[in-house]
Amino acid sequence: MKKFLIALFAVALPMMMQAQSEGLFSRKAPKGQKADLSAYAAKGAVPEVDGKVVFKDVIAAPGKTKDDIFTKLAQWASLRYEANSVMGDDYRDANFFKNLEFAKVTKADKQSGALQCQGAEELIFSLKALAKNYTQAFYLLNLNVRDGQVEFELNTLSFNVDLGEGQFTRVPAEDWITDKECLNKKGEMKRIPSKFRVKTIDLVEELKKEIAAAIN
């Protein structure tokens, strides 16, 4: 049995290495191309309000009433923030997510139009044949519904940063992905926190995209 497993691994290893180089397990740009990260490195790409990381926007729903928007938004949130749920088969898809047990909708008040979600999910940086590079992100998403629009605000963001050997430490976004902490004197992103900054911005943009699709 042992000899069989060794032989099987010997056959599978070249295939896994080829798959990794072709991007099956890797999120790197195709060979000869370099990913354009300039938008992520731009000053203010991670906005701050009174020293705290806060992403704000207004998502339009022309011609839709407050009640209609809230009903659709609540349906979306109940699925998006279902604890221990996974969306999609491939982490490279923009709408992929893997929620932790703490994910939930904490408030849904149709009369006031206020809806709050507690985000707790994995953000996967890369997958290789025998390893997963990821973090756990925690945040609050406040959504306020009005006629024709949704006010979007994501705040109270933090990450579980992997220290190795199964040990994690909680780091607030303010100490990790802001311009001050993530960009060097040349305006370039520092290697380790850069992946957190990129993933966070992608997450925010995807959430706004999903909300716009849900309410329109």
Image (cartoon, rainbow, N blue to C red):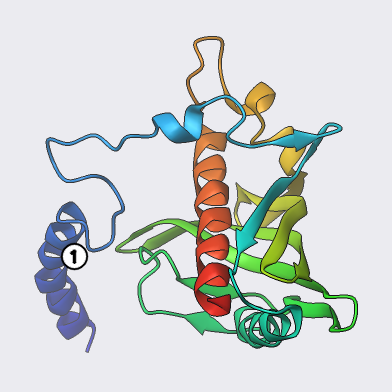
Q: Position of residue 20 (x, y in %)?
A: 21, 57
Residue that appears at 56% across and 16% down = 184
Left or right, 88 with respect to 192, comes to left
Q: Position of residue 45 (x, y in %)?
A: 58, 34
The amino acid type found where label 1 is placed reads Met
Residue 16 shows up from this direction: yes
Q: Position of residue 38 (x, y in %)?
A: 40, 29
Looking at the rendered image, the quarter that the N terminus falls into is bottom left
**Frontmost residue, 191 versus 199:** 199
**Frontmost residue, 97 versus 167:** 97
Q: Position of residue 74 (x, y in %)?
A: 70, 84
Residue that appears at 17% across and 58% down = 17
Left or right, 185 with respect to 109, comes to left
Q: Residue furthest front?
A: 63
Q: Which residue is mark 1?
A: 16
Q: Residues within 10 Å of mark 1 (few under 14, many from 20)?
A: some
Residue 166 shows up from this direction: no
Left or right, 147 with respect to 196, comes to right
Q: Residue furthest top?
A: 185
Q: On screen, 28 above or below 11?
A: above
Left or right, 7 with respect to 123, comes to left
Q: Secondary structure at mark 1?
A: helix
**Frontmost residue, 75 versus 35:** 75
Residue that appears at 63% across and 85% down = 72
Residue that appears at 58% across and 69% down = 62
